[in-house]
Image (cartoon, rainbow, N blue to C red):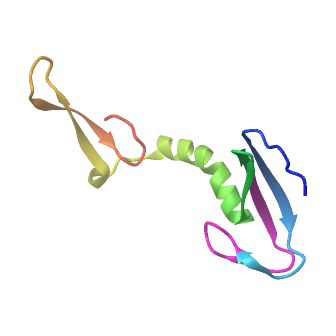
């Protein structure tokens, strides 16, 4: 067999598929199985390093795929509605200029990340 030259780099491919039978493999995030007719996504990552090819792939269910892709929009919507509960508010401390003593500067909500 001939050697195949591989230059450095990475290839990443996402494929939407429908299960034609029950699959033994499961979703990477929620560990749910796939039966016939379920939609799933195949993530395949191929990279070449030092003249060799390395490949990794995993499956993801449609529900986890939607949650993972849509998290930013949902988080921005939540930031506008956050009521900053007291148990999630943390006091941020900073140094006094020219001294080695800290003082409280402001409060931060750990849920939405806004300064209070």
Residue at 28% from the left image edge and 47% from the top image edge: 89
Image height of 113 relative to 60, above or below = above
47 or 79, which lies in front? Answer: 47
Residue occupying image coordinates x 49% and y 41%: 80
Span colored in magenta:
26-45
Left or right of 96: which side holds 53?
Answer: right
Q: Up-down: is 30 above or below 47? A: below
Tell me where residue 13 appears, x and y as whole percent.
Answer: 79, 50
Q: What x and y, as percent, mark residue 17? A: 86, 64
Q: Is residue 86 magenta?
A: no
- Quarter of the image where the N terminus is located: bottom right
Q: Nearer the viewer, residue 2 or 32?
A: 2
- Image position of 28 (left or right of 9): left
Q: Nearer the viewer, residue 74 or 44?
A: 44
Question: Which residue reaches farthest top?
Answer: 98
**Where residue 59 appears, x then y in whole percent?**
73, 65
Using the image, determine if residue 39 lies above or below residue 20: above
Q: Quadrant of residue 24?
A: bottom right
Which x, y percent locates residue 61? 72, 66
| Residue name at image x 90 percent, y 52 percent | 2
Image quarter (top left, top right, bottom left or bottom right) of the C terminus: top left
User: Could you tell me how many numbered marks the image carries?
Assistant: 0
Would residue 10 be found to the left or right of residue 68 on screen? right
Queried whether the magenta region covers residue 32, the answer comes back as yes
């Amino acid at each position: 067999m001939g050697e195949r030259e591989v230059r450095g780099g990475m290839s990443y491919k996402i494929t939407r598929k429908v299960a034609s039978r029950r699959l033994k493999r499961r979703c990477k995030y929620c560990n749910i199985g796939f039966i016939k007719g379920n939609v799933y996504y195949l993530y395949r990552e191929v990279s070449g390093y030092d003249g060799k090819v390395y490949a990794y792939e995993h499956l993801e269910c449609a529900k986890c795929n939607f949650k993972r892709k849509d998290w930013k929009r949902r988080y921005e919507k939540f930031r506008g509605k956050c009521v900053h509960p007291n148990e999630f508010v943390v006091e941020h401390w900073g140094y006094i200029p020219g001294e080695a003593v800290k003082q409280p500067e402001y409060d931060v909500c750990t849920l939405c990340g806004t300064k209070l």
